[in-house]
Image (spheres, rainbow, N blue to C red):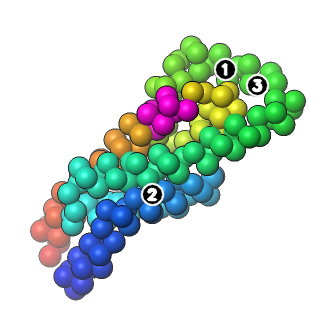
Amino acid sequence: MAQEIFTFLSSFGYLGAFLISLIGSSTIILPLPAGTFIFSLGPFLNPIILGITAGLGATLGEFSGYALGYGGGKIAQNYIKNQMVKAKEMFKKYGGFFVIILFAATPLPDDIVGILAGLLKYEVKKFFLAVFIGKTIFYLILAFAGRYGINWFLNYFF
């Protein structure tokens, strides 16, 4: 049974990890459990390459939220002008770059931060880099946890 699972999961490879994380991060608000897939691939693929590949896919996927905020900025500004001013102040006070990394590297709702970054017209290069750092950290942790956690589990229970 374990051999069939290995064959099935490894058949997706790095391209599968890239695509599932891209799709998972492209969905706004409605989560797709891409992390579970990356965790499951951890024992079968190089966790460093897996984490970087999934991180890149997720980074590109997060641009859907950024684009939504960027494009909807004029509409939103008319309705939430006061909140926009407060959000801008928080980004300046706490450093938007580090806030983006924090939300991307954790299970916190990073879609909201992406939309906010788009609304605030946050610099695209900085947004890309911050999300890439955060998502890569997140997926590296999941890939290594899958690599060592599954092996521990199998050795302990089987």
As helix, strand or loop, the secondary structure at mark 1 comes to helix
Viewer-closest of 126 and 93: 126
Viewer-closest of 16 and 106: 16
Please identify the residue farthest to the front as the structure is shown: 125
> What percent of the width, then of the height, locates residue 112?
62, 40
> What percent of the width, then of the height, locates residue 27?
60, 56
> What percent of the width, then of the height, locates residue 63?
57, 45
Q: Is residue 126 magenta?
A: yes
- Badge 2 crowding class, 10 Å Cα cut-off, few under 14, some 14 to 19, many 20 or more, is many
As helix, strand or loop, the secondary structure at mark 2 comes to helix
Q: CA distance from mark 1 to mark 3?
A: 9 Å
For the point 45% across and 63% down, the residue is 20
Quadrant of the image occupied by residue 87: top right
Residues drawn in magenta: 124-131
Q: Amino acid at mark 1?
A: Lys
As helix, strand or loop, the secondary structure at mark 3 comes to helix
For the point 51% across and 19% down, the residue is 95
Residue 100 vertical placement versus 15 (above, below): above
> What percent of the width, then of the height, locates residue 69?
70, 39
Quadrant of the image occupied by residue 14: bottom left
Residue 124 vertical placement versus 41 (above, below): above
Provide the major secondary structure of the magenta segment: helix
For the point 56% across and 14% down, the residue is 93
Numbered label attached to residue 88: 1
| Mark 3 lies on residue | 83
First reached walking from the N terminus: tag 3 or tag 2: 2
Q: Is residue 35 left or right of residue 24?
A: left
Quarter of the image with the C terminus in it: bottom left
First reached walking from the N terminus: tag 1 or tag 2: 2
| Mark 2 lies on residue | 21
Q: Is residue 88 left or right of residue 49?
A: right
Q: Is residue 5 left or right of residue 67?
A: left
